[in-house]
Amino acid sequence: MPESRCLQGIWSSPWIFIFAASGSAVGLGNIWKFPYVLGENGGGAFLVVYCLCLLLVGLPVLIAEVALGRTVRSNPIDTVNDLSERRIVHPAWVLVPWLAGITGFLILTFYSVIAGWSIAYLDRAVTGEFNNITQVGASSMFNELLATPSEMLLWHSVFMGLVVLTVGQSVTRGLSAVVRILLPMLVVTLVLLACYSMMIGNMSEALNFMFRWSWQNITFDVVLAAVGLALFSLSVGMGAMFAYGAYMSKRMSIARACSIVVGVDLLVALLAGLVIFPLVFSFDIDVQAGPSLTFVSLPIIFGNLLGGQFFAGVFFLLLVVAALTSAISMLELFVAWLHEKFYIARLKAALLMGLAVWFVGIAVLLSLNHWDSKLMYGLNLFELLDKFTSLILLPVGAILLSVLVAWFIPRSMLQNEMIAKQTSHFQWWYKTLKYISIPAMIVITLAGWIGA
Ligand code: TRP
């Protein structure tokens, strides 16, 4: 499709893709999920595995999604339908984008609840509730929030409202301008906080934990956790980046743009780790605390910091905006599809999808208190969705999508898409995807499930 005919418009400059894709990548995955998964899986060795996963699985799959998106300039569902009508692929492949859309939907149901926690903490930050808080105080503040469904519902609703309003606009509008300001501010704030945290916390033990390699505890389920986190953090495995690729200008090298996105994503995650772990070790917070880790550690740093109220306000505001720029990419697939296929106005489509997510989100937040029954494997609905999407849906989605791109889409179609003079990039990517990423993802996912 010629660039001018794309329904949703094209990014006006190549850099806008980088900002928008980084906006989708950087979010709660970096600041909430990365530290707690690193904590649960033993630190240093996990980090090495995670970096390998980013490079050998995350990056190639990211490039695949973006390249396919740019080739066809449409939403994933129509794309696969179109390819099957042209007899390039079997019609059964249309299940893949549907699975992807459902994955995004499910992730958003709990993502919005956690983003709601961030708004709740923004509220507490500006009213000075972190001042001189102790570790016990910080834990009970978090537990109180979990035990108050009405407050969680309020902030979950506010966040979903923001998501609907943002997705209701065209994604090309405004997003990159926001991310362009947000990202540098987030990085600078995290650097400052990391310095302070290392001053007041236990720096040596934190560095030891994060960066010392010890291979004993590496099992397949740890590696699967790393793959799941890499996919989650880069927003790949469910066609979200596909949409961003569809709006990308042909002038940009996909490989270079995606490498920058991976770099930014890792940087933010590492900085979040450097903020949180020094506190974890000096205030005796359980490294394995799980999803509460970030929300229990952060108030302590702000409560002890000179001007902490101001920093806390800025930080949680940035976190909410970062969550918003990520969340919109989860709804984009269905919204773009409803808009392009049925000509439903974007805002209406976003409202429809948003309401459904909001509704399921209520069950998710209730599963943290009133409905705290363990559904399966000792997990409640919130934990189940978190694990199910990261450890099952995203890896399976990434495998299927990669197999589709690497083995079924004609090579020439993709090759035209990667800028001609960068043939070496193409070869490198194509071979890695085919012979390293796909087999590795299959082995790791199966072995992880069996619990090898
Ligand atoms: N990457 C985002 C984060 O780190 C979350 C996210 C946005 C996502 N879009 C996604 C995860 C699509 C998986 C799939 O917070």
Image (cartoon, rainbow, N blue to C red):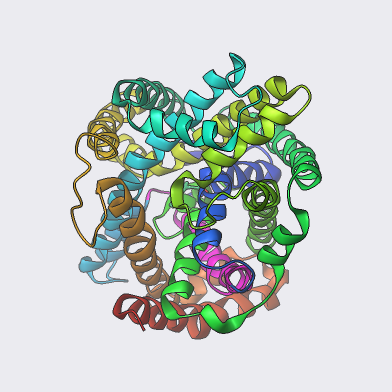
The image shows residue 426, relative to residue 143, as above or below, that is below
Tell me where residue 319 appears, x and y as whole percent.
58, 34
Query: As drawn, is 174 to the left or to the right of 231?
Result: right
Q: Which residues are magenta?
A: 46-75
In reply to whether residue 51 is colored magenta, the answer given is: yes
Instruction: List the single residue furthest toward the top.
Output: 127
Q: Residue at x 39, y 35 (%)?
A: 112
Of the pair 233 and 178, the residue shown nearer to us? 233
The image shows residue 420, relative to residue 251, as above or below, that is below
Residue 247 in view, yes or no = no
Tell me where residue 40 appears, x and y as whole percent.
49, 62
In reply to whether residue 225 is colored magenta, the answer given is: no
Q: Residue at x 47, y 24 (%)?
A: 120
- Numbered-mark total: 0
The image shows residue 423, relative to residue 38, as above or below, that is below
Tell me where residue 328 appears, x and y as whole percent.
45, 36
Tell me where residue 94 appears, x and y as whole percent.
25, 61
Query: As drawn, is 53 to the left or to the right of 356?
Result: right
Residue 24: image quadrant is top right
Quadrant where the C terminus is found in the figure: bottom left
Prevailing SS of the magenta stretch? helix
Query: As drawn, is 303 to the left or to the right of 70?
Result: right
